[in-house]
Image (cartoon, rainbow, N blue to C red):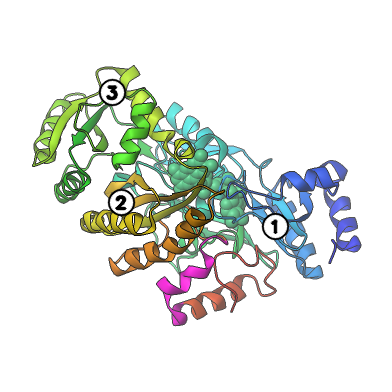
Amino acid sequence: MSFPAALARELESLLGRERFRTDPADRAVYAYDNSRRRGQAGAVAFPLNEAEVADIVRACNTHRWPLIARGLGSNTVGATVPENDALVVSLERMNKIEAVDKANRYVIAEAGATNAAIQEAARKAGFFWPPDPTSAAYSTLGGNLACNAAGPHAVKYATPRENILGLTAVTGTGEIIRVGTRTTKGVVGYDFTRLLLGSEGTLAIITRATLKLWPLPEAVATLRACYANVDAAAGAVSRIMAQPDLPWVLEFMDAEAVGLIRNRGVELPEGTESLLLLEVEASRDGLEGAVKRLGETVKGEGLVAFEAAKDKEEAALLWQARKALSPSLRTLRAGKINEDVVVPVAEIPALVARLGELAEAADIPIVSFGHAGNGNLHVNLLFDPDDERETRAAKDTLPQVFKAVLELGGTLSGEHGVGTAKRDYVELELGPEVLQLMREVKRVFDPNGILNPGKTLPPS
Ligand SMILES: Cc1cc2nc3c(=O)[nH]c(=O)nc-3n(C[C@H](O)[C@H](O)[C@H](O)COP(=O)(O)OP(=O)(O)OC[C@H]3O[C@@H](n4cnc5c(N)ncnc54)[C@H](O)[C@@H]3O)c2cc1C
């Protein structure tokens, strides 16, 4: 079915030609996301405020036409790929930072503001917002909230769910709802704020949010703990998490990932086969003591070296190499299945061992790195797309990775979300009863199923 002419006329008169696009070139660039999947957009709308978002949703609801909220399309799971000529509603022009309140420690921003712009506004006031995905410069607040996207600081400061106070959103019938508080305490009614986080635009379109701010640390040390093998590094992660002084960054890399960062110019002591990248934050007076205590904790069999970055340049090089790990994987194989599974921290050694067995059995490289303090590993199954055997082996290994993760008490996605990429596996984790309840919740918020249909939950 092509985009209804009557709906197009309504939206054009609401937004004008410049903000309601139907020509093929505009539709094409809003028809894919970072999953590299491609769909078909019927039209693209650029609202400037909440009232316009509500009008757009009401019009689509009247015509029973699907629509998709879009930030900047950086998600990796196909969550913004439009199907069946859906309307793409780009929030990118709703990008105001409305207030930074130091006394109450919050920032209010519109959904289309980038994570980087929010961090910059917070930084000027001496604060930060903990969710810090590597995509900060090209991902929006709405996308971060809808995917519950996080980053390295989640080990100490957690994810958007724990760093939001309230939000405004538009439901599938076009109602504007304000949920949550501006206070750090509040227990009135059901917690719709957190329900909407991670819902990938399937329950409501988020238009603005009030986010919890934290003071910037006085001093930070960047450190690396080099290990002879992944078991030794994984053992150190468990010890670090069991003691009271949490680092604010605790990143893990396996042997293949260590090889990749060496290729990018990071010099590591001989014998390093696994690496922890750590950052400790403290008061200026307390930093030395905090580093010393961490040094005691990381000691153990298999430790090759524990060292602080000599200067800012060395710390920056280490971070650049860490952030480039995902694209660097293409130097090993052109094809990758990139998962972001989570297991309880103490189960990381078991997961790493299981991944080693699966890689050997399938005869493909599996490279793991990620946010070890949260038990969140980016597991990459690599293959040559021109090699039929490797391609099949990677695809066949994926369900075995998920099975291992669930057997270890984990979850299928820590931060990247479900979209369409993992949709067919969610029942394995949730079970039929919970899945049914979720479908009923979806019907309450979006009775005609027009908001991002086909994403997150498998079809019933
Ligand atoms: C190089 C790179 C590095 C990345 N690093 C990280 C990382 O470190 N951590 C991490 O968690 N993720 C990471 N990501 C994934 C991605 O950037 C995040 O998921 C991000 O939150 C998506 O934001 P976006 O604005 O691009 O949203 P989009 O991709 O446009 O949308 C994502 C989902 O959110 C929904 N959505 C968007 N805006 C709204 C809204 N206003 N209301 C309701 N729903 C909405 C969409 O419908 C879709 O379901 C990375 C991606 C790339 C390309």
Q: Is mark 3 within 8 Å of ligand 1?
A: no
Q: Residue furthest bottom?
A: 433
User: Which contiguous range is marked in magenta?
Assistant: 420-434
Secondary structure character of the magenta stretch overall: helix
The disc labelled 1 sits on which kind of residue? Answer: Pro
Check disc 3 and report the residue beneath it.
Answer: 267
Kind of element beneath mark 1 = loop
From the viewer's side, name the closer residue of 21 and 223: 223
Q: Percent from the top left, x then y, of residue 394?
A: 46, 57
Mark positioned earlier in the residue sequence (3 or 1) = 1
Rate crowding at label 2 as few (under 14), some (14 to 19) or many (20 or more) other CA atoms within 10 Å. Answer: many
Kind of element beneath mark 2 = helix
Q: Percent from the top left, x then y, of residue 79?
A: 59, 56
Check disc 1 and report the residue beneath it.
Answer: 82
Give the left or right position of residue 37, taking residue 106 as reference.
right
The disc labelled 2 sits on which kind of residue? Answer: Asn
| 423 inside magenta stretch | yes
Check disc 2 and report the residue beneath it.
Answer: 374
